[in-house]
Amino acid sequence: MIIDVHTHVFSPEVTMRREEYAANDVCFAQLYGNAKAKLRTAEDLISEMEDSGVNKAVILNIGWGSHELCVRTNDYILEAASRYPDRLIPFVSVQPAAGQAALAELKRCAVAGARGLGELRPDVQGFDLNDRRLIKPLVKTLTDLGMVMTCHADEPVGHHYPGKGTLTPDVLFPFIEAHPGLRLILSHWGGGLPFYGLMPEVEKALTNVWFDSAASPFLYQPEIFERVSELVGADKILFGSDWPLLKQRRCLDELRATNLSTWSMRSISGGNAAGMLGLSE
């Protein structure tokens, strides 16, 4: 089974009103304000999956700044997944600064089939990931509901790109240590956090942490799969494309061209995600 844990879809309404949404939300403006940035629907994703041979895909929301935009766009994520229950896995968005309203939205979405929260963008959404007063109730709700959290991650070095922020390993690691029971996916190879995997305290803290390979061809050389497997284990890596930014087939071809063992390849391409999400392979 091939599972892409990092894709983004939007309703036709958002696609048609791109400029209006960009004018009203910082995260959307950064990622999709440029008319050349691809906005695609769930139907487009299903077509892409058929072409690339991907069996299932996590459809992530983005880090909207307002509670109202989270709710509105969560509805499309949930509706799309209900139309393709065997193919799409919904992850929804909340604005933690909304307090009890955010927790209520998580519960509403869980009842409707959401399996996780994400892609969370604390720096863009305007809250501190390590503000325990704000974050502790959110994490407790997620764990009580059995939900996974996907958080964006940024590299402290390297080239700039739209959406690159300040969620670097030094910001992410205290959060990980503070919430060992939370199942957490760090996008984009965790901003390089796996490279610290030989530190005993980092290795210990990564028990419930996974790293996705979203946008990998834009960030690292293909050897990243082998190096991270050596540092933290192939069981910690999840295949992600960041579609529609990148074609799924391109990302899969890069993975298949590595020197990884058959077991590692199967684990990364879908086995790890299936186990974490409780899916039957």
Image (cartoon, rainbow, N blue to C red):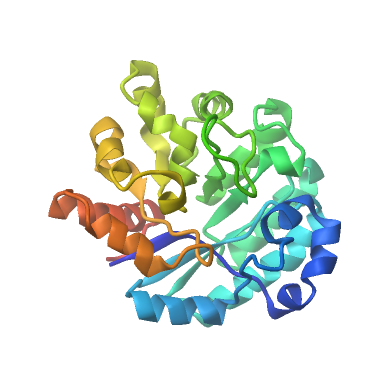
Hey, which quadrant is residue 166 in on the image?
top right
In which quadrant of the rendered view does residue 24 lie? bottom right
> In the picture provided, is 141 more to the left or to the right than 208?
right
Residue that extends furthest to the top in the rendered view of this protein: 200
Looking at the picture, tell me which residue is in the foreground, 133 or 194.
194
Residue 139 drawn at (x, y percent): 60, 39
Q: Position of residue 54 (x, y in %)?
A: 35, 71
Who's the residue at 36% across and 69% down the image? 249
Name the residue: 39% across, 22% down. 202
In the picture provided, is 230 more to the left or to the right than 89? Answer: left
Q: Is residue 46 visible?
A: yes
Q: Quadrant of residue 110?
A: bottom right
Q: Position of residue 99 (x, y in %)?
A: 78, 42
182 in relation to 198, above or below? below
* 177 vs 45: above or below: above
Q: Quick one: quadrant of the C terminus?
A: bottom left
Is 219 placed above or below 205 here? below
Q: Left or right: where does residue 279 sit relative to residue 46?
A: left
Would residue 275 appear left or right of 108 to someone viewing this image?
left
77 and 125: which is toward the camera: 125
Question: Where in the figure is residue 188, as x and y percent of width and height?
Answer: 47, 45
- Quarter in which the N terminus is drawn: bottom left
